[in-house]
Image (spheres, rainbow, N blue to C red):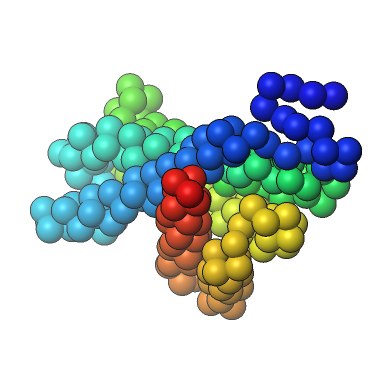
Amino acid sequence: MTTPDLHDTGTTPTLAPDMERRLLRTAGFGGVGAALAWMGQPVLVTLTAASGAPDSPAWADIEASRWTGVIEVVIFTAIGISTLVFVLATWQLLRARAGAASVAQQVGLVGGVVSGVAWLVVASESFRLYTSIGAGLPDLTDDPELQRLALEGTFLDITGGIVLFAVGFTLWTVLLVTTARRAGVVGRPSAVVAGLSLLAPVAGLAQPFSSPWWAVSSMLCLLVLGCAFLVRSRR
């Protein structure tokens, strides 16, 4: 079977050079875009802390920073969409070079897709407070401590979404350092960076009740691979 973008070599399909460059560029922009969007979150946290907002807010604190929800949903949605673009474009490159996908490879793909969707879940959880349903919290109780307890449930859900991203992206990264490396989709230096990024989730598992700092390693992986793909697309 042939398409305008594939040449039949009799073994595994290969992409036409212009299509390969397009996919490399798309994957590159996805990886870099996800990392750059993520960098907006620590900036937002820093600005919020500088404004004197408490670490454990009550409803009055949420209401006083209503634009925070809008900014967060934009940031997290951008991370999720960019991650999906990176994963799906890289998958197309891999399939063109490696042929039919094994079940293990498809599990890696599902992990990559889940990692992108997880950020969309985080965006939804972040914005739910800034809806009419969230605004009804003071009608249920005017006790700040009970409000903090209810809000803590949302913050736990957001953290759960970040953990889901880490689990999914770990599966995807394993695919990158194995099959994608053998197929030549990922170069050796990029594979080394991706492999080292796998150490962070392991370290996170060894430190219960620590902050989810290990998500940073995945973003660095996206940034490095995204830049590598963009450089290759210009050759």
Up-down: is 170 above or below 58?
A: below
Residue at 73 percent of width and 39 percent of height:
14
Residue at 65 percent of width and 34 percent of height:
16
Residue 186 location (% of width, % of height): 61, 57
Viewport quadrant of the N terminus: top right
Residue at 34 percent of width and 49 percent of height:
36
Which residue extends farthest right?
A: 10
Whether residue 137 is visible here, answered yes or no, is no
- Judged left or right of residue 136, residue 51 is left
Q: Nearer the viewer, residue 25 or 45?
A: 25
Which residue extends farthest left?
A: 51
Q: Nearer the viewer, residue 86 or 40?
A: 86
Q: Nearer the viewer, residue 210 or 84?
A: 84
Whether residue 221 is visible here, answered yes or no, is yes
- Judged left or right of residue 129, residue 18 is right
Residue at 88 percent of width and 38 percent of height:
10
Residue 138 location (% of width, % of height): 28, 33
Count the marks: 0
- Judged left or right of residue 157, residue 35 is left
Residue 13 location (% of width, % of height): 78, 38
Residue 75 location (% of width, % of height): 34, 40
Q: Nearer the viewer, residue 154 or 114?
A: 114
The answer to which image quadrant residue 88 occupies is: top right
Up-down: is 19 above or below 196?
A: above
